[in-house]
Image (cartoon, helix red, strand yellow):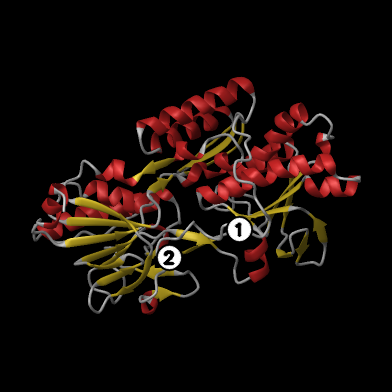
């Protein structure tokens, strides 16, 4: 046993086991650096993924390593924090143990930060056939898929087959769907038109489908209206008030019975929390989240806490729980860390209150929308604000520099530079859910 490991094992502190290294888990371990706790981070990956920029990996603007950060680089300087790459299989709260594919770990305090996965609302066919965007592997699948479709269109024997290859359907008009649609529209304008000159670029159609009456439903009406205008100006077909009920890999079926041919359907219509076996009694079934109190403690489970997307906390302004976004996860993690320090020193805990810091989405070059309180921005100012916020939120100076350089090159060259089919995508083999979801795969 190494000297470092012996020193960690010898620490006379209670053990905090954190499951999941997303925004909440990573923020928590940073805040507990040097605290009177032994902290063990468990995750099925060896890296943190910056999910807000996954769509740029999927559309060939960024490399995968520019939005990922190794956990060990973060944990290495922390004397009281350790990391284990392991898949959590179950929790046994009665004897305070976490079961993984590499054995069991005892805990004094358990923190669940398992995040969310795609919600198909019980439609097995869509879950089997549609693509999704919750992990780097899935982003690379989408990148390979649209590039392969471009190549396949060159071999299509007739116009109908060519149009099917170039028909891209995105279900869900939230930030992910809007950003994906805008990025594909820019690819049609630049890459397809300039580098696939044998193809008629007008045959590439991008459909954004949503069952609501406007895109960006959770944004202000002003932001939604601006986003819709931007999308339509870029040539995106926006289909509102429409519900997709089926997809067999070639044909999209809508609730009203209409059908549309499309080789690619990307599902971005909802998420649900990732819960763990052994804690079913604490789940809120429809939400797939754990009911927590204002201290983030899971209802009925002493010393078990939940953060972020998997936590359902109600406040006066948030009767249905906090939004499943990074800011809520980070704020809860910071507050829980502060409460754990209060607990260690025998001070009373303080209840959590969520502060809404606003919402933002980018549609294309100079096209973005920002809501901050009663302030609504659109266009160039919002675009610059979106870039600054996302750049500063990335983990690690290397990643920030990489992303900044990639954005600068794309701005100057009008090209999505990473158009490489490294790992060809075979239909029917798409990764389902985060790969793998901590605790379920």
Asked whether, in this view, residue 109 is left or right of residue 367, the answer is left
**Which x, y percent locates residue 283?**
40, 74
Residue 281 visible in the current orientation = yes
Q: Any mark on residue 177, and which?
A: none
Q: Nearer the viewer, mark 2 or mark 1?
A: 1
Residue visible at 63% across and 34% down? 419
| Residue holding disc 1 | 269
Residue 438: x %, y % from top left: 41, 61
Q: Residue at x 51, y 51 (%)?
A: 135
Q: Is residue 251 above or below residue 357?
A: below
Q: Earlier in the sequence, mark 2 or mark 1?
A: 1
Quarter holding residue 267: bottom right
Residue position marked by numbered label 2 in the rendering: 319
Q: Nearer the viewer, residue 227 or 410?
A: 410
What is the secondary structure assignment of the residue under circle 2? loop
Quadrant (top left, top right, bottom left, bottom right) of the N terminus: bottom left
Residue in the foreground of this view, choosing between 76 and 131? 76
């Amino acid at each position: 046993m190494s000297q470092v490991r012996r020193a960690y094992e010898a620490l006379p502190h209670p053990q905090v086991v954190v499951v999941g290294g997303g925004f909440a888990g990573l923020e928590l371990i940073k805040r507990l650096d040097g605290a009177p706790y032994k902290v063990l981070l468990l995750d099925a990956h060896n890296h943190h993924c910056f999910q807000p920029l996954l769509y740029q990996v999927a559309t060939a603007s960024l490399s995968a390593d520019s939005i990922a950060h190794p956990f060990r680089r973060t944990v290495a300087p922390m004397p009281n924090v350790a990391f284990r790459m392991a898949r959590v299989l179950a929790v046994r709260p009665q004897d305070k143990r976490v079961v993984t594919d590499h054995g069991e770990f005892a805990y004094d305090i358990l923190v669940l930060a398992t995040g969310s996965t795609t919600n198909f609302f019980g439609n097995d066919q869509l879950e089997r056939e549609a693509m999704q965007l919750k992990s780097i592997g899935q982003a690379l699948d989408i990148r390979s898929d649209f590039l392969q479709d471009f190549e396949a269109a060159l071999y299509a024997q007739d116009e109908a087959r060519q149009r099917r290859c170039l028909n891209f359907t995105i279900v869900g008009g939230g930030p992910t769907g809007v950003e994906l649609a805008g990025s594909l529209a820019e690819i049609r304008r630049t890459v397809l038109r300039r580098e696939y000159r044998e193809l008629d670029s007008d045959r590439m159609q991008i459909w954004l489908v949503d069952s609501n009456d406007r895109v960006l439903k959770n944004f202000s009406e002003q932001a939604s209206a601006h986003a819709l205008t931007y999308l339509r100006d870029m040539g995106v077909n926006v289909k509102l008030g429409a519900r997709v009920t089926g997809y067999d890999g070639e044909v999209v079926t809508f609730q009203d019975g209409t059908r549309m041919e499309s080789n690619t359907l990307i599902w971005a219509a909802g998420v649900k929390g990732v819960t763990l076996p052994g804690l079913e009694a604490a789940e809120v079934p429809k939400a797939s989240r754990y009911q927590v109190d204002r201290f983030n403690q899971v209802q009925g489970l002493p010393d078990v806490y939940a953060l972020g997307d998997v936590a359902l906390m109600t406040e006066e302004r948030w009767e249905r729980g906090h939004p499943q976004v990074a800011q809520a996860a980070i704020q809860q993690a910071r507050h829980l860390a502060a409460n754990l320090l209060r607990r260690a020193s025998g001070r009373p805990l303080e209840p959590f209150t969520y502060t809404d810091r606003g919402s933002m989405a980018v549609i294309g070059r100079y096209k973005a929308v920002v809501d901050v309180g009663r302030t609504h921005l659109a266009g160039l100012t919002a675009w610059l604000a979106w870039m600054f916020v996302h750049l500063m939120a990335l983990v690690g100076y290397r990643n920030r520099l990489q992303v900044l350089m990639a954005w600068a090159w794309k701005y100057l060259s009008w090209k999505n530079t990473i158009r490489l089919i490294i790992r060809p995508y075979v239909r029917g083999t798409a990764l389902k859910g985060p790969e793998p979801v901590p605790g379920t795969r």
